[in-house]
Amino acid sequence: MNLHIKKNGKSNKGFYIALGVCLIAVGVAAWTTYDSVVNYTTPQNSAQSGTAKTNNTVSGIFVTESSAPASSAAASSAKPASSKPAASVPSKAPAKKTTAEAETFSSPLNGKVLQGFSKEPVFSKTLGDYRAHPGLDLSAKQGETVKSAAAGTVTKVYKDDQYGNTVLINHGSVEAWYCGLAKTSVKEKESVRQGQEIGTVGVPPIESAEGPHLHLAMKKDGQYVDPAAILK
């Protein structure tokens, strides 16, 4: 009876030992499987952190450090801009002088001064009163040639009630009125040269008492000036 009990006790102990070993084996196997699964499904943080430290942006594109030098190399190896100098822009040619830009003036005719330029009132033989005389009266024979004092452009040819047939010429900064002409020989917008005939001497109606002569008036910068100071 006692022997049977002892035999059963030894058998139970072996069973539990075997069971424990099996449980341990099952636990180890389970842990190994779990670790493999976890390592497979979980991102490698260490590798990512290492990559994140070397990430950079090149021209707005997010790249790793390993690719950055390649971009730099590509940039450095890019064909440099042409060093050929840009075609020079030709400078503007100097403006040609027009006929209106006169440099010298000469007398329209050879005659004595009958009445000089005056801003102050002077006596008028024709009108019998005193008034300013914004011009220069040069004596001449009826029909004598009147010449352009300088190169210029004819602005206007007309008949004035007081000064008779008149030719207005633009001589650049100076405008000249050739008044009291018997006839005119130029047209509006015509270019004239210095010394060219523009008409003949007549009698200005407002100065008829002085006989045939040329009444020459000049303006510079919009103001009447003494023609004697301009004529050479």
Image: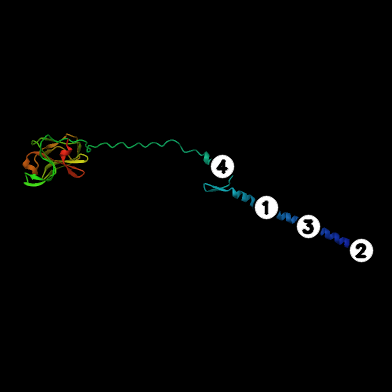
Describe the element under mark 4 as helix, strand or loop.
helix
Marks 3 and 1 sit apart, C-alpha to C-alpha, by: 24 Å
Circles 3 and 4, Cβ within 8 Å, touching? The answer is no
Give the residue number, with chain letter if any, for mark 2.
4
Give the residue number, with chain letter if any, for mark 3.
24
Q: Quadrant of residue 110?
A: top left
Q: Residues within 10 Å of mark 3 (few under 14, many from 20)?
A: few
Residue 178: give x, y in percent of width and height.
Answer: 14, 40
* Sooner in the amino-acid sequence: mark 1 or mark 4: 1
Residue kind at label 3, given as amino acid type:
Ile
Give the residue number, with chain letter if any, for mark 4.
70
Residue 51: give x, y in percent of width and height.
Answer: 61, 49
> For this rendering, which residue is in front, 12 or 228?
228
Residue at 64 percent across and 52 percent down: it is 45
Marks 3 and 4 sit apart, C-alpha to C-alpha, by: 54 Å
Looking at the rendered image, the quarter that the C terminus falls into is top left
Marks 2 and 1 sit apart, C-alpha to C-alpha, by: 54 Å
Residue 166: give x, y in percent of width and height.
Answer: 13, 41
* Sooner in the amino-acid sequence: mark 3 or mark 4: 3
Describe the element under mark 1 as helix, strand or loop.
helix
* Sooner in the amino-acid sequence: mark 2 or mark 3: 2
Residue kind at label 2, given as amino acid type:
His
Q: Is residue 110 left or right of residue 1?
A: left
Describe the element under mark 2 as helix, strand or loop.
helix
Marks 4 and 2 sit apart, C-alpha to C-alpha, by: 85 Å
* Sooner in the amino-acid sequence: mark 2 or mark 1: 2
* Sooner in the amino-acid sequence: mark 3 or mark 1: 3
Give the residue number, with chain letter if any, for mark 1.
40
Residue kind at label 4, given as amino acid type:
Ala
**Which label lies toward us, 2 or 3?**
3
